[in-house]
Amino acid sequence: MMIFEKLRNALGAYIDRVRLFRPNARLFLLNVILTGISMGVFRLLFNFYVLSLGFDESLVGRLISVSSTTALLSALPMGYLADIFGRKYSLVLGGLLTAFSVAGGVIWPTEPSLYAMNIFSGLGQGLWGITMSPFLMENSGEQERTYLFSFSQGLQMLSAFFGNAIGGYLPGLLGRQLGAAATSSAAYGWSLLVVAATFALGIAPLFLLRRQRLESDQRSVFAPIKYAVENPALLGKLIMPLLITSIGAGLVMPFMNVFYRVVHHQPDPVIGNLFAWGSLAMGVGLLIAPPLADRFGKIPVVVVTQGLSVPLLALLGFSPWFWVSAGAYYFRLALMNMSTPVYQTFVMERVDASARGTVASLSSMAWSFGWALSPALSGYLQVHYGFGPAFAITITLYTIAISMYWAFFWRKQPMAE
């Protein structure tokens, strides 16, 4: 009975924090739901769409690298401008660019066009991602802030659960209407057009956002630059672990659908359901994270959850049994990613308001650098050596990054938040 009483009290406290969400935050969460559904379908089907056009895994890797390289090169100026011109229009523009990139890849299915659309995708997703953390920071109070960061990403993952589930069956459904095979480029293409339309629909709530005004000194065009110049050591410690993690993640995460098709010989519906339940597991992990951060501290949650995910990644990549790999996939996703919004909150709380967009862009650059560099390398490794080397390198890099979090923020201050 005491356990149930504690669970009830914890749930009540959680609900009380959610009720503190401000109108702007609630509107943003509507956008998150539609974006999450769209991204769930897109991430499942885009690689298959490219392969269905007659291209190979090497091109898939290069396309991912182009998108991430674009996000990398544009991140700092976009974050800088977002600090000056505001979050609302940055979010709207990011959504429009993403919707256009998905539709354009279907309308013009040539290799040059796919490269061009991935440039637009990098700009759109990069701008949206850079703007999200400062927006959430500026539209939340101290009590509910960690909950809002985690809730927004958890809701996105739960939405992706439905997107992945739908995506596994959507090509078959549309293929029957078109008289084409479920694995044909036509079926995949029409499925991606549905994704583009859903992306566009998700922009509507953003037009209702009330713009936040910064103080005059925070709007100064030199404020972000001044902060970066005055705090290089802090920014280096905040961003370096993200960079190392991204290099490892880019080797395997963009190819998980290809991994399960090639290594474990699973069909699209099975992979779609696997991704769907994986998104659900990640969403649950993200929703659990705020109370854990309140109880143990933000950095301990980051270090422990990511540390526990490393042996699961080894099981995922090297187990010969699909059911073992799939189980490890679920638990690894929940553990590795539940710390993401906690760390984002940690970062945003330690920088000045005038520099939040710039710092978010530096974080995005660090993440995009790995995803720009690694997929092309991974595509080459897959073609010539299989997935083994990519997983081994990723495990090593994750271990290094987790050690950095511990050394920079926890070793001297065990309960640092």
Image (cartoon, rainbow, N blue to C red):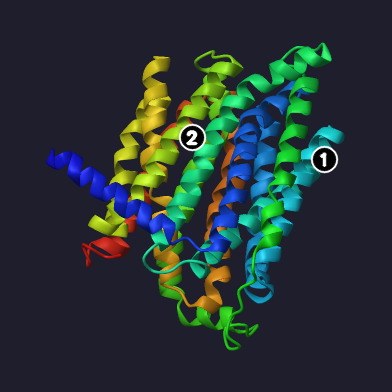
* Residue 316 percent location from the top left of the image: 40, 26
Point 39% across, 14% down: residue = 321
State whether residue 395 appears in this view.
no
Q: Say left or right for 412 vs 143.
A: left
Closest to the observer, 125 or 54: 125
Which residue appears farthest toward the left when viewing the image? 2
Q: Quadrant of the C terminus?
A: bottom left
* Tag nearer the camera, 1 or 2: 2
Q: Where is 79 relative to 287, above or below?
A: below
Secondary structure under the numbered disc 2 in the rendered image:
helix
State whether residue 413 appears in this view.
yes
Q: Say left or right for 199 vs 352.
A: right
- Residue position for label 2: 279
* Residue 408 percent location from the top left of the image: 32, 64
How many residues crowd mark 2 within 10 Å: few (<14), some (14–19), many (20+)?
Answer: many
Closest to the observer, 218 or 226: 218
Point 64% across, 19% down: residue = 169
Q: Which mark is residue 263?
A: none
How many residues crowd mark 1 within 10 Å: few (<14), some (14–19), many (20+)?
Answer: many
Q: Amino acid at mark 1?
A: Gly
* Residue 12 percent location from the top left of the image: 30, 51
Secondary structure under the numbered disc 1 in the rendered image:
helix
Q: CA distance from mark 1 to mark 2?
A: 27 Å
Q: Quadrant of the N terminus?
A: top left
Closest to the observer, 225 or 338: 338
- Residue position for label 1: 104
Q: Amino acid at mark 2?
A: Ser
* Residue 10 percent location from the top left of the image: 26, 49
Q: Say left or right for 86 vs 385.
A: right
Label 1 or label 2, whichever comes before in sequence order: 1
